[in-house]
Amino acid sequence: MKQICLFLVLLSVATVASAEIKVETVMVPVRDGINLATDIYRDDTTRQASVVLMRTPYNKARAKGAAERFAAAGYVAVVQDCRGKFGSEGVFMPYNNEGQDGYDAIEWIGQQAWCNGRIGMWGSSYVGATQWQAAVEHPPGLVTITPTATYSSFYRNLYLGGAVRHTLIARWASGHSTKPDAAKVTEDWDQTLLHLPLSEIDDQVGWPIPWLEGMLTHPSPNGYWKRLDMTEDMLNLQLPMQHVVGYYDFFSRESVNNFTRMQQLAKDPVTRKRQQLILGPWDHGTIGKSAVGELNFGAEAEWDAAAATLEWFDRTLNENVAPAVAPMVPVRYFVMGENRWHEAEAWPPAGYESTSFYLHSSGRANTRGGDGQLNRTAPSVEEPVDRFRADPADPVPACPVTDQRPLNAATWAPVNQQTIEDRVDVLCYSTEPLTEPLTFAGNAHVELFVAADTPDADWVVKLIDVHPDGAAYNLAVGILRGRFRESELEPKPLTPNETCQITVDLGPIAAQIAAGHRLRVDICGAYFPLFDRNPNTAEGPFGSSTAVATESVYHTSAKPSRILLPVSASAR
C-alpha cells in the first residue's frame, strides 16, 4: 500500500533545473476559516501565467519534481495539502470536503496577480478524485482537468458486483484515519482481513474508524453514497479532459467509463470532442512503466506521464502554445502481448466484434489438469455440470502465497496463477494451443448459468493467457456476489440449488494471445483479500456465521455458459 500511495502523488519525473524556480508556502483560507498549506512554484521571470493545481492528502512536498517541471515550462504550479493533512488545518475526512475546498482554492488562485485566469488540475487516484469533486462545483477559472486512475462514483471505487475491494480500503484507512495515542495498527493483516463481521474491521485494524465502518456496511449504491456520486453532474461540465488508467488498475472500469460518458453524453457538443483516453498495461502503482507484476510489456509501455500532462496543458491552458500542438487523438490504447500502442476515435475501438467462447467439460473441469475446454462451438448435448466447494475458511487467494508475498500482499498486477489453478475449488476451461494470434480490444464479459446450495455465493471469473511452458497470467478479473445478480439496489438471496443466469463484467481489455498459447477462463468462489470473502449466508456485513457453498456451473444446449470477447474482425 505504501508503494501505491507514493504514486498517488508523484508523476515520475526528474527535477528540471534549467530555470530559477522558487517555491513559496502560504496558508490559503477556505469558507469555514480553515487554512490549507499551499506551495507555489514559479519561475522568477514569470509575471503572470496559467496555473496548474494539485490537491493531495499525501504531502505536497512529494510533488516537488513535477511542480518544478511545470513551472520551468512557463506555468505556475500550486500544490496544496488537503484539509487535516500535513501542513493544513482541520480534520481529514476522506473526500468529504474536497469539492468545497477545491472550489475555494481555485477561486483564491484566480485572484492572485500571477494567475492569468486559466487554471488546470492534475494528479491520480485520490488526487484525481479531488479534480472531479472541484469541477462539479463549477469554480470560476477552471479550464481543464486530467483525472488519472480515479472515480466519479465513490461507490464504484470500492465495490464491484456487490463485493468490496477489501485490502484497498482497510489498509488505506489504517494510514489515513486519526489514530488514538495508545492505539497500534494490527500486526496480523491476514487474520484482520478474515475477521467477521465485516462491520468490525476498523476495530481489528486497531481503533474505531466510523467512516470505514460506514463504507463497509453500505454494500448497495443507495443514498449513503449520493454525495460522492458525480456521474450525472459531470455531464454538465464544459472542460477538456485527459483520462489515464491501466487495465490492471482497480479504477480501470471507472476511468474508462468517465471518458466514454463525457465523449458520448456530455451536454456540450464541443466538450465531447475534447476528451482523451490513455489506456495502458499498468496497475495502480506502475503507470508509465513497462514492468508490471511478473511481466514486462516492453519499451513501448514506458510512458512519460508528466510529459503527457504538460502537453495536455499546452493544448488546453497555454493559448500561445496550443496552435503548435499536434491534433488530439481521442483514444490511445496498448495491446498487451503485441506490446504496441494503437489509436482510435472511441472506446470500444472499431474493428472488433463480440465473439463467444463456450465452456465445455465432462463434469471434471476442476484444476488446470481437469477436462475443461473452451472453444467457439456452443454445447449441443447435455454436458455434465461442473461443481466446486467454496469454503469461507479457506478462500481462493487472489495471488499465489509465497515467502515474499503473504496473503495480505496480493496484487492486482499479472502473476503466474498456476498454483492457484491446482486447487480443486477452481474450474479451468482452456482452448487448444492457438494456431494464429488472437487479438481482442473492448469490454469483455461472461454469461454463466449457475446455482449454489446456499443463500449467497460469489462467482469470480479470470481471463488467463497460458504460455507454452504452462505459466498462466491473469489478463482480467470480474466478480459477482449472488444476491446482487438482479439488482445492486435491491439484493435478493439465492434460492438454493435453483439455476440462474448471471453476467460477470471483466472490464476494459486489449490483448493479443500469441500462437502456441492457450486462452483460459478460471472460475472460483473468491479473490481474497483483494475482495472480501463471501460468508455465503446472505447475512450481509453484520453477520458472523459462514457456510460452505457447493457452486455449480452449467454448459448445455439450453444453458450455454460463455465468455464474450471483442475479437478483431479480421481474425474471425
Image (cartoon, grey):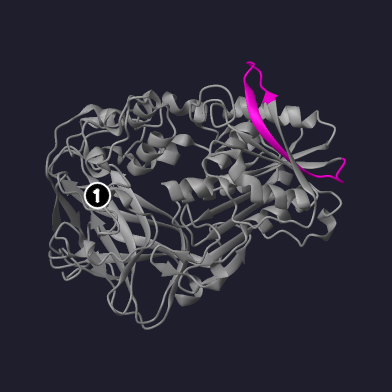
Residue furthest to the top in view is 32
Magenta highlight on residue 45 = yes
- Report which quarter residue 295 is drawn in: bottom left
In the depicted view, which residue is nearer to us: 278 or 70? Answer: 70
**Where's the C terminus, which quadrant?**
bottom left
In the depicted view, which residue is nearer to us: 27 or 436? Answer: 27
Query: Residue at position x 66%, y 18% from top?
Result: 31
Count of picture labels: 1
Query: Residue at position x 40%, y 34% from top?
Result: 173
Looking at the rendered structure, the kind of residue marked 1 is Ala
Please state the extent of the stretch shown in magenta in the rendering. 28-47
In screen coordinates, is 437 left or right of 470? right
Please state the horizontal and vertical placement of residue 171, each as a whole percent of the image.
Answer: 37, 40
- Whether residue 312 is visible here, answered yes or no, is no
Please state the horizontal and vertical placement of residue 462, each as a whole percent of the image.
Answer: 32, 59
Please state the horizontal and vertical placement of residue 461, each as a whole percent of the image.
Answer: 30, 56
Query: Residue at position x 14%, y 55% from top?
Result: 388
Residue for badge 1: 526
In screen coordinates, is 294 left or right of 71? left
In the depicted view, which residue is nearer to us: 227 or 189? Answer: 189
Please state the horizontal and vertical placement of residue 210, each as a whole percent of the image.
Answer: 37, 23
In the depicted view, which residue is nearer to us: 8 or 89? Answer: 89
Magenta highlight on residue 533 = no
- Report which quarter residue 215 is drawn in: top left
**Counting other residues with Cα less than 10 Å from the Cα at mark 1, is it few (<14), some (14-19), or many (20 or more)?**
many
